Amino acid sequence: MATIQISFNGEVVYDLQLNKETMTIGRKSDNDIHLDNLAVSSHHAKILTILNDSFIEDMNSTNGTYLNGSLIKKNVLSNGDIIKVGKHEIKYINSNVSSGEDFEKTMIINPDSDGMQETEGSREIDQSVGKIVAEIASSDSGKASHQKAKIRLVSGTNSGKELHLTKVLTTLGKPGVQVAAITRRPTGYFLIFIDGGDDSGRPKVNDDEVGSHAHPLSNNDVIEVAGVKMTFFFE
């Protein structure tokens, strides 16, 4: 499990395990990571963890969130990264973070073309407008006690195309607009909201927006991510 080490003015304050999918950072006491300093916004940033990977996201803070000295909005975390929030430094520690070799392929589903393109060994989410991206992790630890599943596109030129959910993590979306993930767990399949533009809202399941927690998926649920609809169903 990933941990963080929190320091203030160069001195380590405490260590904390990232034992929740979403952990908020801020000055108010209702945050999971409470940093009581005026340079920190009430709800400053959040860390989202999916399987072995974590992301840091600024929550429109006043003074910004820095990763290894650079101002960021949202970024994937690597072992040893330093997050700076106000005068606090947060070191991300995770020896099990996925490497590039842990990702088998990236499937790009483009609603405006007749086909799907595959690129081997890539972790980068394609930035082209109009493309739906599915990043599939090759790790397959922990066998589920349920049937394997698929998603079938039901809108756009690629309507009818199917993607087998054979891996434990599949991310879907349009970078800068909306990104979500389907995770396969021993108890079933779940949809998690990862990122969205200012006006994009959240992904939907059967026309209802998902919340901040993992949303369980059922057979024939209709998922909408970045304006593209797809049906989730069991093989």
Image: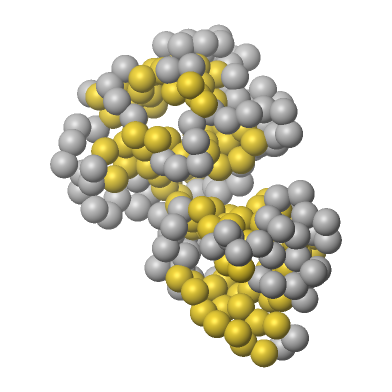
Residue 166 is at least partly visible in this image: no
Where is 215 relative to 46, above or below? Answer: above
Q: Quadrant of the N terminus?
A: bottom left
Question: What residue is shown at x 29% (from left), y 50% (from top)?
Answer: 140
x and y, in percent, of residue 163 in the image: 39, 26
Quarter location, residue 52: bottom left
In the depicted view, which residue is nearer to us: 226 or 198?
Answer: 198
Question: What residue is shown at x 45% (from left), y 42% (from top)?
Answer: 213
Residue furthest front as drawn: 29
User: How are the colours assigned in the image?
Assistant: secondary structure
Q: Is residue 223 left or right of residue 13?
A: left
Where is 27 relative to 137, above or below? Answer: below
In the depicted view, which residue is nearer to us: 109 or 141?
Answer: 141
Quarter location, residue 92: bottom right
In the depicted view, which residue is nearer to us: 210 or 79?
Answer: 210
x and y, in percent, of residue 91 in the image: 61, 75
Q: Quadrant of the C terminus?
A: top left
Question: What residue is shown at x 76% (from left), y 49% (from top)?
Answer: 60
Residue furthest bottom as drawn: 11
Where is 13 relative to 113, above or below? Answer: below
x and y, in percent, of residue 179 in the image: 57, 36
x and y, in percent, of residue 111 in the image: 58, 16
Question: What residue is shown at x 23% (from left), y 43% (from top)?
Answer: 187
Residue 235 is at least partly visible in this image: yes
Q: Is residue 162 left or right of residue 81?
A: left
Where is 173 relative to 17, above or below? Answer: above
Q: How many marks?
A: 0
Residue furthest right as drawn: 63
